[in-house]
Image (cartoon, rainbow, N blue to C red):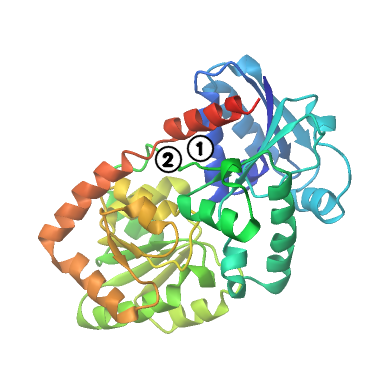
Amino acid sequence: MRIAIDYTAAARQGAGIGRYARELVDAILTANSPHSFILLTAAAGLGEHWAREKQRLQENATFPATLTFRDLPLSDDWMARLWQRARLPLPAEWLTGRVAAFYAPDFVLPPLQSTTRAFLTVHDLSFLRYPETFPPKLGAYLAKVVPRSVARADHIFADSAATRRDLIELLDVPPDRVSTLYSGVAPCFNPHPAENERAYLQARYDVGARPYILAVGTVQPRKNYVRLMEACDSLAAQRSLDLVIVGRPAWLAEPILDAAKRRPYVHLLGFCDDADLPALYRQAALLAFPSLYEGFGFPPLEAMACGTPVVASTASSVPEVVGDAGLLVDPLDVPAWTAALAQALDDLTLRDRLRQAGLARAATFTWARAAQEWLSIVDSRR
């Protein structure tokens, strides 16, 4: 069976959905599968980066002869303008050739021929659950194009049971048309530090000289960073402690950035190289993940895989990822966050339990399992 995959997010985005798409497609290409795959990419401006990525994919694929590439001389913005905003009726098969199935891992489907089965991943419906955390234009765009793609999809993958429930409740998706597909965690996230790891972080990011609480995720309202800072204020006043936030500033970030500037103990690192994330997790005293809503939540999983204790939100999908391997706290309850963070910092017995439980739980989330489940679902809907 010929299967086309939209690889644009994987090629163009460093974190989040880009990482999801890269890891899942890598696992699909290395699984024992009889299918051939065509990767469709809006590749304008990617240059040598894309050439290296294509070479990596060819070298890693179990059957590289079954992997081909179709590059559009467009940016992802232009592809969205033509296919989603202008709704240009140009089927993706004009670019990929005839395929049995098309998979879009990033919320929206291109125009497709009626004979092509359409598969779609919806990571979350935060733009419907928390519209106030989005710029109005972006929220309105997502509220239009995502339901439209959901209605066209033959089958939908949701990152979590919480997102699956949202799809059923908010967009009236029949339960048999949506499956939960949990993500995995990459092998680089492990509890084995490199030599001189802490010294490296101090030299490169100026963090690690003092114990630090780590938070990972784009700087935007849904991540709930202002409440996290408020929870950390009394802790930082009483002890030698930093709060390190890794994530690129996104929409509506100004109040968060202003709150950080008023607090000398807060370090905003911006976007960090993927290669440095495991060290940042391993050297942290703990990971704090206070998000108001998540479709899945990579940071708690990655922290657990690195052996770092986790204090996380009770919201949406986060408890599905963390289970009983972390402390779960209402994201709106600032005093409860202060208490939980202090407990996770000071209670050595608890810290050891969380470390061991986190390692065991993270080991159950693998990309190989995700790929096999993905292939099974696609195969079953021929």
* Kind of residue sitting beneath label 2: Gly
**With 360 as the anchor, is 147 left or right in this view?**
right
Q: Is residue 195 visible?
A: no
The image's mark for residue 271 is none
Please state the horizontal and vertical placement of residue 198, each as a whole percent of the image. 28, 54
Q: Quadrant of the C terminus?
A: top right
**What quarter of the picture does the N terminus occupy?**
top right
Front tag of 2 and 1: 2
Q: Please tell me in which quadrant of the rendered image residue 171 appears.
A: bottom right
Find residue 60 and report its horizontal and vertical position in percent: 52, 24
Q: Position of residue 52 (x, y in %)?
A: 61, 32
Q: Amino acid at mark 1?
A: Glu
Q: Secondary structure at mark 2?
A: loop
Q: Quadrant of residue 267?
A: bottom left
Q: Which mark is residue 184?
A: 2
The answer to which image quadrant residue 236 occupies is: bottom left
Q: Are marks 2 and 1 in contact (CB under 8 Å)?
A: yes
- What residue appears at the point 43 percent right and 56 percent down from the top-left corner? 317
**2 or 1: tag closer to the N-terminus:** 1
Task: Tell me if residue 279 comes above or below residue 313 in the rendering.
Answer: above
Instruction: Give how far across and how far down residue 261 sits, in percent.
Output: 45, 80
Q: Which residue is mark 1?
A: 23
- Tell me the CA gap for discs 2 and 1: 8 Å
- Left or right, 94 with respect to 129, comes to right
> Badge 2: few (under 14), some or many (20 or more) residues near its Cα, within 10 Å?
many
Query: How many other residues sit within 10 Å of disc 1, few (<14), some (14-19) or many (≥20)?
Result: many
Kindly identify the residue that appears in the image at 40 percent across and 41 percent down: 185
Q: Secondary structure at mark 1?
A: helix
